[in-house]
Image: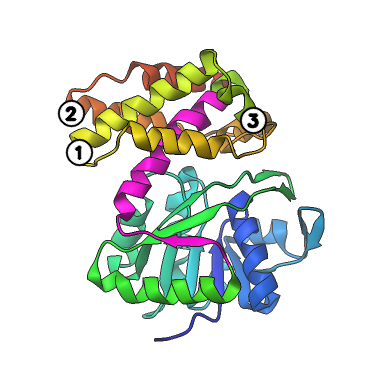
């Protein structure tokens, strides 16, 4: 089994920097490279980022000069996936494993359609409280990467990534049912991300009884109904599990969409509420909470 010795990362957001920093400290900074388009390369080359107070300088390479990597980590927002597919083109060789830490339930399929499903392993990043504003990343909990394979052709890639994570002490869980985990995390994101953006609130605000918590739980229950209609055995016990996870995060923290509102960036609402609404309509399931959240986010983003 071929050892993973070099990693290319697409995306320098919170997760891209968090995982890049961890891997670089264990593998060596010359074994972790950020690949970006020409415009971003001109912006980031020679610059530094700060991770929990430590100033870091990573190797950045324009997409045109990229070479095949043993592992490619895709860590962009859903709005940047189409562009990322082109950016990573030269990173993919016959033995490359691709791991997406993106939100949602479809990035693995989209990337696999372009580069071959056999290159993919499925991943869910959860339990972290990373926040990045500008070039500064802070987090108190790294969380865990839940990883798994859906096809036999993906098993060797999964084994190779598990060996890498063992070697670099990156927290992970090897999932038997990765699709269930994917939908579980999607349920959480639909609830907490959109609620925190719309109410401009924190994790602590959704712990406590009130309209924020009621909205979050209502949105999550609509995901359960849609998932069940699609044959995914999501339940109230999954909701309770992820509610407990939220309570382990820093009370004054806010998830990615909450950070989007602060930074006046466009969010992943289409991937969250948009997906729930469309799939609910297809299954004949009403999704009024997600429709309300979707409408509210549209109004917020129009004001930018």
Q: Is residue 22 magenta?
A: no
Q: Earlier in the sequence, mark 1 or mark 3?
A: 1
- Label 3: how many Cα within 10 Å (few below 14, some 14–19, many 20+): some
Q: Is residue 181 magenta?
A: yes
Camera-nearest label, 1 or 3 = 1
Separation of residues labelled 1 and 3 (CA atoms): 34 Å
Q: Position of residue 121 (x, y in %)?
A: 37, 64
- Where disc 3 sits, the SS reads loop
Camera-nearest label, 2 or 3 = 2
Q: Which residue is under mark 3?
A: 264
Q: Position of residue 222 (x, y in %)?
A: 32, 25
- Where disc 1 sits, the SS reads loop
Tell me the residue at 73%/45% (across/down).
Answer: 134
Q: Position of residue 22 (x, y in %)?
A: 65, 65
Magenta: predominant secondary structure element? Answer: helix
Q: Which residue is under mark 1?
A: 230
Residue 66 seen from this side: no
Q: Which residues are magenta?
A: 170-196
Q: Position of residue 195 (x, y in %)?
A: 52, 24
Q: Nearer the viewer, residue 44 or 121?
A: 121
Separation of residues labelled 2 and 3 (CA atoms): 34 Å
Question: Mark 1 touching mark 2, by CB under 8 A?
Answer: yes
Tell me the residue at 66%/71% (across/down).
Answer: 24
| Residue 126 left/right relative to 176 | right
């Amino acid at each position: 089994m071929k050892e993973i010795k070099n990693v290319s990362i697409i995306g320098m957001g919170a997760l891209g920097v968090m995982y890049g920093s961890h891997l670089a400290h264990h593998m060596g900074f010359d074994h972790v490279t950020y690949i970006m388009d020409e415009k971003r390369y001109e912006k980031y080359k020679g610059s530094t980022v700060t991770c929990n107070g430590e100033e870091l300088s990573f190797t950045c390479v324009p997409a045109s000069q990229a070479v095949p990597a043993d592992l490619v980590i895709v860590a962009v927002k859903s709005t940047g996936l189409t562009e990322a597919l082109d950016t990573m083109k030269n990173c993919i060789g016959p033995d490359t494993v691709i791991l997406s830490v993106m939100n949602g339930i479809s990035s693995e399929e989209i990337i696999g359609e372009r580069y071959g499903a056999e290159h993919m392993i499925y991943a869910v990043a959860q339990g972290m409280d990373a926040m990045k504003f500008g070039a500064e990343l802070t987090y108190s909990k790294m969380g865990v990467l839940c990883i798994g394979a859906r096809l036999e052709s993906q098993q060797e890639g999964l084994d190779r990534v598990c060996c890498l994570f063992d070697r670099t002490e990156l927290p992970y869980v090897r999932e038997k049912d990765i699709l269930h985990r994917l939908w579980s995390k999607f349920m959480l994101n639909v609830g907490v991300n959109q609620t925190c953006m719309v109410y401009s609130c924190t994790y602590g605000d959704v712990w406590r009884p009130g309209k924020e918590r009621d909205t979050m739980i209502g949105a999550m229950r609509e995901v359960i109904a849609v998932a069940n209609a699609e044959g995914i055995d999501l339940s109230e016990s999954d909701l309770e599990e992820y509610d407990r996870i939220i309570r382990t995060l820093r009370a004054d923290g806010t998830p990615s969409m909450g950070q989007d509102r602060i930074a006046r960036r466009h969010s992943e609402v289409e991937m969250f509420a948009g997906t729930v609404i469309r799939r609910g309509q297809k299954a004949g399931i009403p999704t009024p909470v997600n429709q309300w959240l979707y409408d509210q986010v549209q109004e917020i983003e129009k004001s930018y």
